[in-house]
Image (spheres, helix red, strand yellow):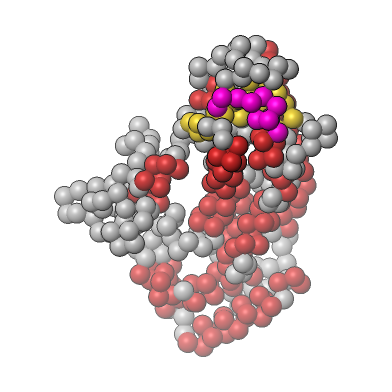
């Protein structure tokens, strides 16, 4: 987040995957209001034009139209970020951990999202496998995951 | 600049900078005038990066220069010297100065702007010809509101369930092979022999 947001603020630019899978998916998983995300993307990108940005952010990034543009929400855990970038090197959190003191917020939010929208994701053939992973967790694990996610969501600014 | 005998006032917006613009089709160097305007609302209506605003203004000024080099008359309202808050007030001012027989433009992509300009021209009693965009691949508002042609699964021009033109049906009016995911709206199930639901695959162009 620091690298993607930092680059964005410095250059007014980030590439597609930084917008979709780093800042964008964080906003989706952290349940940021779509209107606020729309405003932020318009304000920080040199190439943002409302008639392009609005449907892309609402429809593609945030799945805020319930899937009329995309057939699934674009979500991933910290492990994906780690596989696709060098962002996790030197980060205080462990991308593969969803519990414990070094649990990656992106990963916690990802599992929280799967848990919260389990039924809908299970019905969608493109997210069915993702959702099934949640069913392997015990009830206690799911409860502590929710608790952890809520605690992190309440302290987003100090993560 | 002469204020009489203007046939067409060609209004070109900052995101319509195309020398091949449909608005310039049939341009008459004697009777027609291009009008462009820098207005504050286009940078303040929604959030805008300062560099983005600067790039838009720069592109507009270069474009106006290119038009003049081609010998087209271009009336350009600069921020500062001819300050206008909105595209509507800028156009109203240009119409009062040039008194064109018709305002010609490419249909704006912003629906609100299109509505504002249409209302303005009606109030000024000057015909507005909004030409279909040939630069971007898009569906005109007229076709959108009339209901786009069906994807094959939905028998009508609109979604059976909600009776409104749907995004998927709008996408379906693009020529075959160009459209992205050509899917039903979810409410409409495809007919067995004509699959419009492409299993969520994206159809590539060509």
Instruction: State which region is magenta.
Output: B93-102
Depth check, front residue: A72 or B21: B21
Residue A88 percent coordinates (x, y): 67, 59
Chief SS of the magenta region = helix
Depth check, front residue: B35 or B137: B35
Residue at position x 52%, y 72% in the image: A113
Residue A92 percent coordinates (x, y): 73, 67
Residue at position x 54%, y 75% in the image: A112
Residue A127 percent coordinates (x, y): 41, 64
Residue B172 appearing in the image: no
Q: Quadrant of the N terminus of chain A?
A: bottom right
**Number of callouts:** 0
Residue A5 percent coordinates (x, y): 72, 54
Depth check, front residue: B33 or A131: B33
B98 in magenta: yes
Depth check, front residue: A41 or A85: A41
Residue at position x 46%, y 80% in the image: A137
Q: Quadrant of the C terminus of chain A?
A: bottom right
Residue at position x 29%, y 52% in the image: B197
A98 in magenta: no
């Amino acid at each position: 987040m620091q690298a993607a947001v930092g680059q964005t603020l410095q250059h007014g630019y980030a590439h597609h995957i930084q917008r979709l899978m780093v800042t964008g998916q964080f906003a989706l998983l952290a349940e940021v209001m779509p209107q606020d995300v729309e405003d932020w993307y318009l304000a920080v990108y040199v190439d943002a034009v409302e008639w392009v940005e609005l449907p892309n952010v609402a429809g593609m990034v945030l799945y805020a139209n319930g899937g009329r543009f995309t057939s699934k929400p674009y979500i991933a855990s910290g492990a994906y970020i780690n596989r696709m970038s060098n962002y996790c090197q030197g980060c205080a959190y462990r991308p593969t951990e969803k519990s414990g003191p070094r649990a990656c917020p992106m990963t916690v939010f990802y599992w929280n999202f799967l848990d919260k929208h389990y039924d809908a994701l299970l019905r969608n053939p493109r997210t069915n496998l993702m959702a099934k992973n949640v069913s392997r967790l015990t009830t206690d694990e799911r409860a502590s995951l929710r608790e952890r996610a809520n605690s992190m969501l309440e302290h987003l600014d100090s993560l | 600049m002469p204020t009489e005998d203007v046939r067409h006032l060609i209004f070109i917006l900052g995101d319509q900078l195309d020398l091949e613009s449909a608005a310039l089709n049939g341009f008459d160097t004697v009777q027609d005038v291009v009008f462009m305007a820098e207005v504050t609302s286009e940078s303040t209506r929604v959030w805008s990066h300062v560099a983005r605003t600067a790039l838009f203004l720069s592109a507009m000024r270069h474009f106006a220069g290119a038009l003049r080099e081609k010998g087209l008359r271009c009336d350009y309202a600069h921020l500062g010297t001819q300050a206008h808050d909105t595209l509507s007030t800028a156009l109203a001012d240009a119409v009062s100065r040039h008194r064109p027989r018709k305002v010609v433009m490419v249909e704006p992509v912003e629906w609100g702007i299109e509505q504002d300009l249409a209302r303005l021209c009606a109030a000024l009693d000057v015909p507005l010809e909004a030409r279909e965009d040939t630069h971007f691949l898009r569906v005109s508002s007229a076709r959108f509101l009339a209901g786009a042609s069906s994807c094959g699964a939905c028998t009508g021009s609109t979604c059976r369930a909600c009776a409104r033109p749907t995004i998927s049906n709008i996408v379906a009016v693009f020529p075959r092979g160009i459209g992205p995911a050509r899917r039903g709206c979810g409410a409409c199930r495809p007919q067995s022999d004509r699959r419009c639901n492409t299993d969520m695959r994206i159809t590539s162009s060509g």
